[in-house]
Image: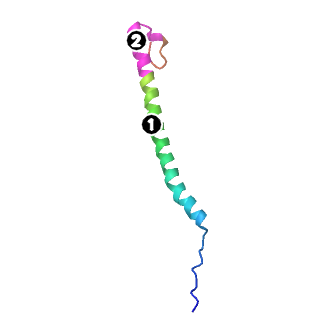
Amino acid sequence: MAVKRHVRSRPIRVFLISMFAVPLVSLLALYGFAASITVSNAISDHQYNVAAKAIASGVEGLIVGLPE
């Protein structure tokens, strides 16, 4: 009696690539999100430090965005 083999609908290579691609893409998205938050906070902290240093040294008129 012959046993029929199951015919695969998709190649195993496609399955393996999708198994690795989905977590990799989500990890990259998470890294990108964390980097965007970190960079924006670093930029605002830097601008605050520059403004505070300028105010402390008495150069208030040169700070962009502050009233003279």
| Kind of element beneath mark 2 | helix
Q: Residue under label 1, please give it.
A: 37
| Kind of element beneath mark 1 | helix
Magenta-drawn stretch contains 8: no
Q: Amino acid at mark 2?
A: Ile
* Residue closest to the eye, 5 or 36: 5
Q: Residue under label 2, please give it.
A: 55
Q: Looking at the picture, how far across and down is residue 13, in whole percent? A: 60, 63
Q: Looking at the picture, how far across and down is residue 62, in whole percent? A: 49, 12
Q: Quadrant of the N terminus?
A: bottom right
* Residue visible at 44% across and 8% down in the picture: 59
Q: Looking at the picture, how far across and down is residue 27, in whole percent? A: 48, 48
Quadrant in the picture for residue 67: top left
The local crowd at label 2, few if under 14, some if 14 to 19, many if 20 or more residues have their Cα within 10 Å, is some
* Residue closest to the eye, 47 or 13: 13
* Residue closest to the eye, 25 or 49: 25
Which residues are the magenta region?
Answer: 47-61
Relative to 66, does residue 12 appear above or below in the rendering?
below
Quadrant in the picture for residue 4: bottom right
Residue extending farthest to the front is: 1
Q: Quadrant of the C terminus?
A: top left
* Residue visible at 47% across and 20% down in the picture: 65
Relative to 5, does residue 65 appear above or below in the rendering?
above
